[in-house]
Image: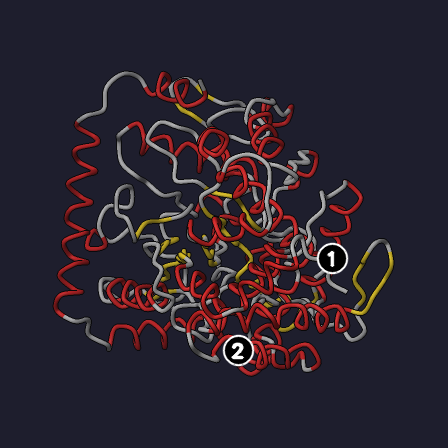
Amino acid sequence: MLKFTCCSAVRQFSEASQAQLLSQITRGFERECLRVDRAGQLAKTPHPAALGHKLTHPWITTDYAEALLEFITPPSTDAAYPLAFLTDIHRFSAQQLGGEYLWAGSMPCKIGADADITIANYGTSHEARFKMVYREGLGLRYGRAMQTIAGAHYNWSLPTEFWLALRDCCPGSGDLQDFINQRTFGLIRNFLRYGWLVPYLFGASPALCQSFLQGHPSDLVELSLGTWHGPYATSLRMSDLGYQNHAQDKLAISFNSLAEYTQGLEAAIRTPDPYYTELGVREGDSWRQLSDSVLQIEAEFYASMRPKRVAPSGLRPAKALRQQGVQYVEMRLFDLNPFIDIGIAPEQPLFADVLLLMCLFRDSPPITCREQSENDENKHRVVTRGRQPGLQLLVHNREQPLQTLASELFDDMAPYAAMLDAAYGSHRYQRAMQDLRQRITQPELTPSAQVLEAVKKHGSYFDFAFEQAKAHTQSLQAVGLPEDTMATFKASAQASQVQAQQAEAATTGSFENHVAAYFA
């Protein structure tokens, strides 16, 4: 039986008048995507100038590698806007590629040695060099192959009016921002408990090219020549092979409060790691990494969900969070769906909205070290063998069937789907949840199962993903953008080039002092 922090809140927000507050949820997406050449190899070309400058463009940039595009949608309270704008970004970008393609999957194309993977070049300003040295450090610490993995992040926040109404029926300590911080960290803790449901339902990376392993041993099974897979895997991207940092296992950064979280981050960026110290920070004037600490900067902390705050210029993220509080959360568990041209299916934000609301309203006690180990183990089981018949997960040290737990979570989420439908005057949330629920007892309906079937049909992961890349890119290129939309993208690209030039012209002082000021 569910325990709610404040049962009256669930009843209150189920009424149409109060549910309306949820129509002002702010959302946004970030989607990473590799550029590949006509042979399906990692593109060696620079970031296309027609896309604007990667340092200053608000919507089109790069993540780690020069060939790893990142598309960002502006935050919006219009539920349909993020995916519509993301589609426009894809169409505009695809039309500027000059014969290259947008890779379709989370796991990369065929890649060579680490030295063949070029990190992103942002220019000569101190800010640009800072980003480049950080990426040099990531490559030094974890290898550059790991930095070619792509995913999608969902940014989500609730309106002030909602928080005021929630505080009226569920009083908390401190001022409104304190209340928001406390409840948001409760949401995050519950997401750490139940977030395994996301890779089960939407994981789409059960296989990869052998080249990604870089000769390292793994528990994967050879599916075909050049393709390795987990027979029941859902998301190798989120497994130990993927975007993880084993050096961070000893960090134990707590999500039990804002103070504990920011203190943990501060300690991590100021605590030297012996191995990173041995690697060295500089060789003469050449920087190998920003520091020898466990984390170079806060962004290096990999977590399924992160509390975020848009930091004023010159204020580090952890400091901005500590001083100004949480502004939104960033959900980081979505694989790219290789069957969708923009990598994200329409039902994904619908499910995320429902899950996040349940995590917010549901009672959320502090997470102990034992429970954190249990949460980590559950995620590991789901991403590596989530479709395995009879798979069991841990609940309070007891094994329980995944299907039973998933069905119970869908039952628990039902009031929130109804709540959101009341807010928007629709039935799309409840319909989406009904459709997704079928994946619990019919794992063959999951994207991970469908990807494996497609890989078998095409003969290899590479052949499947490359065919999808070509088809998606060509379909995106075939749809012309409205004249005003095209003008907006071209103007933003030109403006970003000017802004980057101005940043370079305004650069003064030494880079060493710039780095020192960041950590001061």
Q: Position of residue 391 (x, y in %)?
A: 79, 69
Residue 461 seen in this snapshot: yes
The residue located at (54%, 78%) in the rendering is 430
Q: Amino acid at mark 1?
A: Asn
- From the viewer's perspective, is 182 left or right of 121? right
- Where disc 2 sits, the SS reads helix
Give neighbour class at mark 2: few <14, some 14-19, many 20+ (Cα, 10 Å).
some
User: Looking at the image, is mark 1 or mark 2 earlier in the sequence?
Assistant: 1
Q: CA gap, disc 1 to disc 2?
A: 25 Å
> In the shown orientation, is residue 261 left or right of residue 424?
right
Choose between 414 and 308: the one closer to the eye.
414
Q: Which kind of residue does numbered mark 2 sit on?
A: Ala
From the image, state whether disc 1 or disc 2 is nearer to you.
2
- Of residue 79 and residue 168, the one placed in the foreground of this image is 168
Q: Which residue is mark 1?
A: 378
Residue located 63% across and 40% down the image: 255
Q: Position of residue 432 (x, y in %)?
A: 53, 78
Q: Position of residue 493 (x, y in %)?
A: 19, 51
Residue occupying the point 34% across, 31% down:
129
- Dot 1: within a 10 Å radius of its alpha carbon, few (fewer than 14), some, or many (20 or more) residues? many
Q: Is residue 5 left or right of residue 44?
A: right
Above or below for 453 versus 383:
below
Rendered-image quadrant of the N terminus: bottom right
Look at mark 2 in the image and give the residue it sits on: 432
Q: SS for tag 1?
A: helix
Circles 1 and 2: CB distance less than 8 Å? no
Confirm whether residue 247 shows in the render: no
Q: Tell me, what colour scheme is on the image?
A: secondary structure
Figure quadrant of the C terminus? top left
Q: Is residue 447 above or below residue 199?
A: below
Q: Residue furthest right?
A: 398
